[in-house]
Image (cartoon, helix red, strand yellow):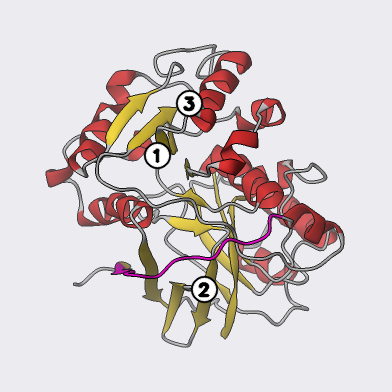
Amino acid sequence: MNRKYFLSALAVTGLAYPSFSKVPAMAARIGIPEAAALMPSYLQPGDTIGITAPAGHITLEEITPAIRIMESWGFKIRAGSTVNKRDFSFGGTDTERQQDLQAMLDDPSIKAIMCARGGYGSARIIDQLNFSNFIQYPKWVIGFSDITVLHCHINRLFGIATLHSKMCNSFPDDFSKAEPIVQETILSIKQALTGQRMQYSLPADPNNRIGTASGILIGGNLSMIQSIAATNSEPNTIGKILFLEEVGEYMYNLDRMLNNLQRSHKLDNLAGLIIGGFNRLRPDDPGEEFGRTVADIVMEKVKDCTYPVCFNFPVGHQKNNYALKCGVMHKLDVQKDNVILNEIIV
């Protein structure tokens, strides 16, 4: 298969994840690594996936391709009340978005929640959500970009795994005619939700720092991670493999956000660092050139650290945006010729 990136998913049979004590926030406060997350139940044919819009607005027509594809996987789909709603850029008012997501968190018949799209808005409702039922009956929360807020909040406070992946607005209209890379990334969602062990391999990047690390995988959109600093959603990065992606920013702003992570010591004690897609970056203003690449900025921030670093991992605002299980143990192997990220069965 002559592709820049390839995915293989290995079925896990007869293996179960243990239940871990849910004390992640306390662990972060006293400065120690956290235990691996509690794994929600994997999906079976006939299970229901709810679709909600906690951030930007979307129509039923726009999510229909995703509904059709997920139904072909054997799942039932239930569109939430925020689908077709709009409050300027949002998928309904803050109250409407909070209530729709809350209903899905509380409904035991819904086994996974797919966020319809990103945009902006999750941080506006996160503190109004009640996770008491969700903690008792965990389910997969799926999405990326603005949904990074939910990943970080759920991983940090409740120690429950979530799924960083494409959302409804990234599903192709006709799956059979989609590019192979698009088909693979969409199928990676199904593979993750049905309990397959995720394993990724990609070519080496010349800016990589070689090494091997094991740790809990966390991360997401850089802007969102920086925006929740000093809140109870802020991730504990000690001993973690951190992945970052970004889109549409000026180079100096990338430096500013990464400088914040450096100054707040979020980069000091990582097990490893994964840099995904940093795409559609804005050109410098004439006469105000920043003069550094993404790799220059990143390596400057971690120059005193020794953990492995890899660039151009297939995650982010791009076609090759594969599913990653946040809160789950992984092994990162950055070698001269390739990079491998494996989910570890604990």
Q: Can you give x and y, in whole percent of width and height, for residue 299 in the image?
A: 67, 71
The residue closer to the viewer here, 189 or 111, is 111
129 or 236: nearer the eye?
A: 129
Pinpoint residue 4: horizontal percent, then vertical percent. Answer: 31, 69
The residue under label 2 is: 346
- Type of residue at label 1? Met
Label 2 neighbour load within 10 Å: few <14, some 14-19, many 20+:
few
Q: Residue furthest left?
A: 176
Report the residue marked by disc 3.
Answer: 53
Callout 2: SS: loop
Q: Is residue 6 above or below residue 112?
A: below
Total of numbered circles in the picture?
Answer: 3
Identity of the residue drawn at 66% across and 30% down? 130
- Give the class, few, some or many, for how many residues have Cα within 10 Å of label 1's Cα (few <14, many ≥20): many
Identify the residue at horizontal 56%, vertical 67% (top origin): 274
Magenta span: 7-22
| Residue 23 located left or right of residue 185 | right
